[in-house]
Amino acid sequence: PDFITVQELANRMTEKGSDIIKALMKMGVMATINQTIDQDTAELIVEEFGHTIKRVSESDVELELTGPEDKEEDLKSRAPVVTVMGHVDHGKTSILDALRKTDVAAGEAGGITQHIGAYQVQMPGGERITFLDTPGHAAFSAMRSRGAQVTDIVILVVAADDSIMPQTIEAISHAKAAEVPIIVAINKCDKPEANPTKVRQDLLQHEVFVEEMGGDVLDVEVSAKQGTNLDKLEEAILLQAELLDLKANPDRAAEGIVVEAKLDKGRGPVATVLVNRGTLKVGDIFVAGSEWGRVRALVNDKGQQIQSAGPSVPVEILGLNGTPEAGDEVVVVENEARARDVTDFRIRQKKEKQSTMPKASLEAMFSKLA
Ligand code: GDP
Ligand code: MG
């Protein structure tokens, strides 16, 4: 069935009509600019041009902006992104604070650290680890429910004097559902009543098998309070990261995820973004969920203005036209027209989803925008 005109398809992708016609010819389809092509052909063309169509469900499709997979030879290793989870009062915040103090780059920067939703620690050997600064399961599941996978590794904090508690179990199931490896930080080991062995044993019941119990989950006995073994915890993270072989192509248009966003009185909408691949630069035009902007400034976790941010580098973006949501995908696009087009489409799609008769077809995706 007729689906979309070549012209409309070209507009949607901000590609030249003549290029689409050429691509169609290669596929053996002869069409003029005003002719309509069917859905399957349109999909093939969309893919041919490096845009991909994401099937959210059988009947629901969304235009995916992200580019094609990177070539193996373009990939470079990147810092692991770590989320800290665990039962209330087991020491998540204390561990995040203590880890932050291990950053060797903080001194050079004058030690100004500000809360931007994520921070990066540099180890004495130069390796880096990125921590999501919002401990807790709510943020993790909120992002995941939006399809955003930002975390490579979960640090499961278990207090050695309290062992497994309800939110510990919850954290385990979150990590397992997301298929993210766990590292167990057995905290509060400075306490006389600390019993790390009990923690390891209790974890068995929840199918977390640490090395000492014959499994392959790494665990470290720490004290956030006394700053004990944080280097060991970081080593475990780097070891796990090595096993995961985390890589990204830094030399391409940036793609990332919003980890935090707010409307700042002085600076306007501000989003903290973790770049997945590519390098985000001042001046880039980007889409973030249903918002878009031009990067006016990039601010790192030490409050410094920087010119660019590569994979796994947490950075605040200034220059948005509105406030996006945590979990929104950030994609750099070629021009303002494209950014407007995409956000218009997404805003309209949101409205359509909210209406009682959800009209969610591929046709809706391609239908002409104002
Ligand atoms: P969260 O709710 O998991 O973020 O836990 P917090 O980091 O707020 O810590 C809860 C309480 O445990 C605070 O009173 C901390 O001072 C204390 N605490 C955290 N880590 C340690 C530790 O390693 N040893 C001891 N003795 N207390 C700790
Ligand atoms: Mg806390």
Image: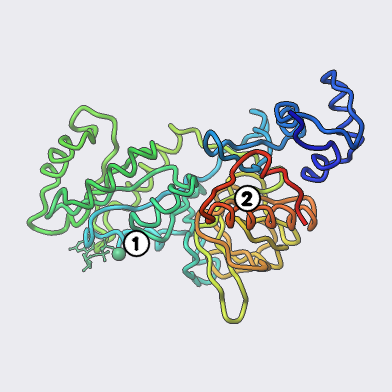
Q: Is residue 36 above or below residue 370?
A: above
- What residue do we see at 36% from left, 57% from top? 138
Residue 247 at what x, y percent from top left? 56, 37
Query: Which numbered dot is residue 164?
Result: none
- Say what amino acid the circle numbered 2 marks: Gly
| Ligand 2 quarter of the rendering | bottom left
Q: Is residue 207 above or below residue 232?
A: above
Q: Quadrant of residue 351?
A: bottom right
**Label 1 neighbourhood size at 10 Å, few (<14), some (14-19), many (20+)?**
some
Q: Quadrant of residue 317?
A: bottom right
Q: Which residue is mark 2?
A: 310
For label 2, the SS is loop
Q: Which residue is mark 1?
A: 98
Q: Earlier in the sequence, mark 2 or mark 1?
A: 1
Horizontal side of 141 relative to 222 (left or right) equals right
Outermost residue, bottom direction?
266
Looking at the rendered image, the quarter that the C terminus falls into is bottom right
Q: Nearer the viewer, residue 324 or 192?
A: 324
Q: Is residue 78 above or below residue 317?
A: above
- What residue do we see at 40% from left, 37% from top? 239
- Say what amino acid the circle numbered 1 marks: Ala
Q: Nearer the viewer, residue 326 or 315?
A: 326
Horizontal side of 175 relative to 344 (left or right) equals left
Residue 280 at what x, y percent from top left? 67, 54
